[in-house]
């Protein structure tokens, strides 16, 4: 419990620096730009790589900054590029993703195992459970009707997303070591 408290405390102090605020805002901007290139398969299914700058943000600044940035980026994304009605559940999902990435990567060594764990946690908790619940509430479709296609899409994408996340986070870690 003490480690969790220290992790949250350190992460909350990260955004006091102007340099860190600028880096966080640039990563949020990258996330928003990558979201513009999302491939929408249907109302309940899409392919996107917007999680990459989000994972980097969690790695650099921790779970508190990840949650704040997740909520902020979801609201800004809706203002810039609305895809249907605004639904606060997706803001909660973005915040939970930021917390998971921050908990998994903040001040920790980047490894394939850690990337697999983080991606599976985000897929199960956010993509499969929370987002499927939000979509079933929003579109009036049954949770268990949406679940199979969402599980298949996410399971197929896990290896691709993990490999991309590992290489991006290793690159960000190398850049951080050079300039910080």
Image (cartoon, rainbow, N blue to C red):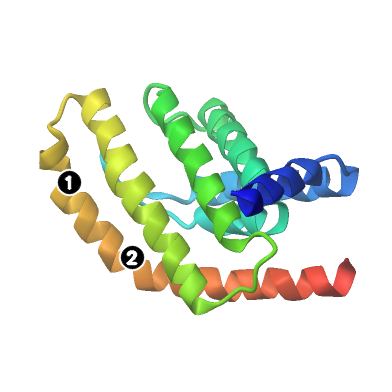
Residue 78 placement (x, y as % from top left) = 51, 29
| Residue 104 located left or right of residue 136 | right
Check disc 1: other Cα within 10 Å, few if <14, some if 14-19, many if 20+. some
Element at label 1: helix
Residue at the image point whose x is 44% and y is 38% from the top: 93
57 up-or-down from 17: above or below? below
Residue at the image point whose x is 64% and y is 73% from the top: 109
Name the foreground residue: 56 vs 2.
2
32 up-or-down from 102: above or below? above
Q: Quadrant of residue 70?
A: top right
Element at label 2: helix
| Residue 126 located left or right of residue 145 | right
Residue holding disc 2:
157
Residue at the image point whose x is 88% and y is 44% from the top: 17
Residue 16 placement (x, y as % from top left) = 85, 39
Residue holding disc 1:
147
Q: Quadrant of residue 180?
A: bottom right
Check the image and name the residue furthest to the front. Answer: 2
- Residue 44 in sight in this render: yes
Q: CA distance from mark 1 to mark 2?
A: 15 Å
Residue 114 placement (x, y as % from top left) = 50, 70
170 up-or-down from 106: above or below? below
* Nearer to us: label 1 or label 2: 1
| Residue 94 located left or right of residue 57 | left
Residue at the image point whose x is 71% and y is 52% from the top: 61
Residue 139 placement (x, y as % from top left) = 22, 26
Q: State which tag comes first along the sequence, 1 or 2.
A: 1
């Amino acid at each position: 419990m003490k480690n969790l408290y220290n992790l949250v405390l350190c992460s909350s102090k990260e955004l006091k620096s102007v340099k860190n605020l600028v880096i966080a805002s640039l990563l949020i901007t990258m996330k928003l730009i990558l979201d513009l290139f999302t491939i929408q398969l249907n109302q309940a299914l899409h392919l996107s790589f917007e999680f990459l700058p989000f994972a980097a943000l969690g790695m650099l600044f921790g779970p508190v900054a990840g949650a704040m940035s997740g909520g902020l980026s979801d609201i800004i994304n809706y203002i810039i590029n609305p895809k249907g009605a605004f639904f606060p559940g997706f803001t909660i999902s973005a915040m939970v993703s930021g917390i998971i990435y921050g908990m998994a990567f903040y001040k920790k060594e980047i490894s394939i195992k850690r990337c697999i764990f983080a991606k599976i946690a985000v897929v199960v908790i956010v993509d499969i459970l929370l987002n499927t619940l939000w979509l079933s509430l929003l579109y009036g479709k049954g949770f268990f009707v949406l679940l199979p296609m969402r599980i298949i899409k996410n399971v197929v994408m896990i290896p691709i997303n993990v490999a991309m996340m590992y290489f991006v986070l290793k690159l960000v870690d190398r850049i951080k070591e050079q300039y910080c």
